[in-house]
Image (tube, rainbow, N blue to C red):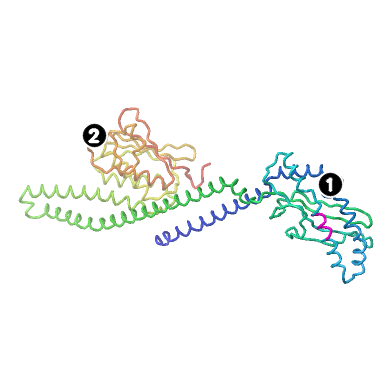
Amino acid sequence: MQRTGKNLYPWAFGTSFLILTVLIGFLIFNTYKLEDKNYQIGQLNQIQNAYGAVIMDDKIFPGGDAIFQTTLVPCLPIWYEKKITKSADADQYGKHCMNGFLDEMRSRQSLDSIFRRIVHQQGLDTTLVYLFHFDKLEVYNERDGTWTTFFALAADDRAGLISGTLKSVTHNNRVFELSVSDKNPIPYRFTYSLYVDYENRNWRIVQDMAPVFLLSLACIVVIVLLSYRTYSNWINQRKLVDLKTSFLNHMRHEFNTPLTTILISAHSLVDSEAGKEDVEVVQLGRIVERQAKRLKAYFEQVMGAVALQEQQAKIVSVSIDRLTQQILSELHLRYRGEIEIQYEPLAEDAEINLDEDYYYSILDNLVSNAIKFNDNSKKTIQLSWEQRGPHCNLKIVDNGIGIAAADQGAIFTAFYRGKLSGNKPGLGLGLYYVKSYLDRLGWTIHIAEDKSGSGTIFYIYMGNAARNGKRQV
């Protein structure tokens, strides 16, 4: 399972990074399309308005109407007749007429000077270039009341060029599409377009978007670096956790065996025939036994940190008052002669969801601390209940040395030793276990100030309880 997690992480990162890159690329592309669509729109509007004022009622450019009348108009009736009668040479005749007309337009156009004058008058960028392009010629069909296209050229077809040097024409750099129409000798409509742009339009847009490109690239690089750093840290942490777990499991096995052997040997030494005759052997045996038990207790505390991480809570609904009395009865037998345990039961028993082993460990650690950190000849610990509506709160009061105010924020941290603990034996894990078990149960603990100046008061808030089989609300 662990190996699967390690293999899954790079795939999850790679997939997420790929999706993020595609999304960023998609957003940049759409930003570019929008920028391309709106690029220089203000200048194009100025050109459109200025050009309209120049030509007024003339066709394309001043003097253009005369070219229409002398070159195009005379061909229209004949061309129209050939089209209607479906003459074989209709298309060839029309192409000949249009080529002659467009050649005449190109040779006599004044669009270059008009465009330069507009650019100068409007204060526009002098690197702008333009292109006038013929689009199509339509004739009105009186028989069915529709416009029929007689001749058309695509926007990128250079045969339709009237004037200008712009090489690339698109919908985005088209200033306008205009139609010139007349009714004599037959109704016709001549459509042309004006395109204005920079020859290096795409490069200019890319330059304008350079901050967006660079920022996006920087974000991707930062994400990659942070993800790589996170992944490396995660791998290192996993290695440390695996190493720690393996080491402690190994120590649990290798350390428990000799400790148990030492305890058995020390006990046997005390009870042996030699021990009965030699007081010094008995004393040494008891010292060895006592120190071995102490060492084993420390070792079990350290091993408990590993076990706590691996444990899963077994939540059951129990009678909290009955369970508390049962645990305290066991602790009384365990710590007989070391501390007096006083308990004030609930006025009305209640059902609470908890893990019995967790609850036992919580009370055991609090009672153990009340013994360890207590200099009184008569050590006491009092447990009582405070009920506020549906909530059950357990109050624990001891007459020990107390907890300094400066330590209360960190006293539940693993291996933390309070200032008042002095040379008391211990590893600083008792209250850490208490807090860990409470967190797993969803409970909280609070340290109250003892006004008497000694001892510690804990409040354990357990949450809602059910009484008499009904939930209190």
Which residue extends farthest bottom?
88
Picture coordinates of residue 392 (x, y %)? Answer: 44, 40
The region drawn magenta spans: 100-106
Picture coordinates of residue 280 (x, y %)? Answer: 7, 47
Along the line of sight, the residue nearer the viewer: 433 or 60: 60
Q: Dot 1 corresponds to which residue? A: 62
Is 436 inside the magenta-drawn segment?
Answer: no
What's the distance in space between the residues labelled 1 and 2, CA to CA? 113 Å
304 shown above or below 398? below
For label 2, the SS is loop
For label 1, the SS is loop
Question: Mark 1 Cα within 10 Å, few/some/many (few <14, many 20+)?
Answer: some
Residue 269, by quadrant, is bottom left
Three-letter code, disc 1? Pro
Q: Dot 2 corresponds to which residue? A: 375
Q: Residue at x 34, y 44 (%)?
A: 432
448 shown above or below 65? above
